[in-house]
Image (cartoon, helix red, strand yellow):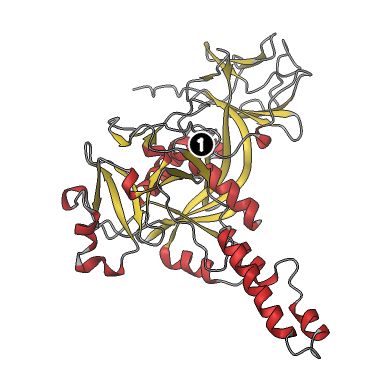
Amino acid sequence: MASRPTTPLLYAELLSNIRQISLAISLGSASDASTRVVVVADGENVELTHHGQSHILHLPAKVALGGMILPIQRPGASALSWRLPLGQATYTDASSAESSTWTATDLKAGSEVVCRRCQAVVVKRDVVKVWKDLPSENWAEMMEFWHCHKPGDHDHDHHHHNNNKPNGVDANRQSARADDMSLAARGYGASSAISAQQGVGFVDLTTLLFVEQDCSNITYSLSTPEHGSPDRQVVASDESSNQIRSLNVFCSSCQSQLGFYNFRTAAVTLLKWQISCDSVSNLSPGLEECLAATLISTTARSGSSRSLLLPITETIATTEEEGVGKDQVVHIWVLNSGIVFTSSAMEATVTRSGAESGIPAMKLLYRLVPREEADRMLDSLTGDAQEVNLPIEAIKEVVERLDRSNCLLPTTERVFKEWKVGLLRR
């Protein structure tokens, strides 16, 4: 019985830094006299003809070779590739695209917050009077540094200048205390910590943070929703919760996990990809977009392009002893944080103007490593891997999506040594 022919896969990636498009084709069988690749006259598409079948791929940007037949360098090869120069028309540089999702200026004041799955209202309309962006991840460290070395702190010089004056030291101490009180009043004191405020919605890269009183229709639990309660005090009184830093938060209507309750900040933290609210951009960020924004922020802050995805909380009780998030950790190595790609293995996206376009994404390497190896990397003085925290279920979903994105790439570009190659949408 003859084997079923494999459908060719066409993949194009915009390399904006060198103004080229990388085009790769996996034929599934050897190229022959019937194989022909042409850049369509408009410069926006390429057409492959192979064994009597025609396949068209929309390019992520317009190229300058409209109408040209691309030469096949190695006749008989099943993997073909070219570099196509961009045309003179302007294009969007994906590396400079906005990396954050749902900033405070994007969200509308008074917007209600609903469960994305069942549309149950979690924060009622007009409860949130104002949205505020949370500081960057290194905020606490910077405030501690500023508190110890804040501008105008010349105690040593003042002490030296006033060492012959009986009241000199006391005056300096009073001045220092006044400075500390002033900084603390503005939220910059050494002991300052961000906590939820009624009527205020705090915005992070991946979450929205609310005071407990502003939320409704949620269930708190140490484990699963059926073991939870709408009254957090009932759950918190459980003896097993003494060593727990957070509780799971579920939608009381559909039982999907919306986020968690953090005891340190006394706040309900909702995951952006699990909820919906009114925004100026009319966009609803998904898990991939939120993780991409986090990885970009982590790279900018630390200078390292490698990250380890670790569970954000261990409160969910499960009998599962193995798997991602338990004994395995996802190790990510960002190759390019701003690409635009198209693949014949998926449908093209459509922009607001109605024209087809490429998909903004982050290209990365990923692999699963034992938890012990991940701990050694984080503890190592010479290690450069940064910790990124997500719920266990989200980490599992990330791996599933990366595995699916791996299939969008040509077969020759899906693996690099012990790593898999993946795409994370932005």
* For residue 73, above or below residue 425: above
* For residue 91, above or below residue 409: above
Q: Position of residue 130 (x, y in %)?
A: 48, 39
Quarter of the figure with residue 34? top right
Residue 191 visible in the snapshot: yes
Residue 319 visible in the snapshot: no
Amino acid type, residue under disc 1 in the picture: Trp
Q: In the image, what residue occupies the spot 61% across and 30% down?
A: 340
Taking the image as shown, residue 373 lies to the left or right of residue 151, namely: left
Q: In the image, what residue occupies the spot 19% across and 64% down?
A: 238
* For residue 233, above or below residue 86: below
Q: Which residue ends up furthest to the right in the rendered image?
A: 161
**Quarter of the image containing the N terminus?**
top left
Quarter of the figure with residue 386? bottom right
Is label 1 in a helix, a strand or a loop? Answer: loop
Out of 33 and 345, give the one closest to the viewer: 345
Q: Position of residue 283 (x, y in %)?
A: 48, 28
In the rendered image, which residue does mark 1 sit on? 102
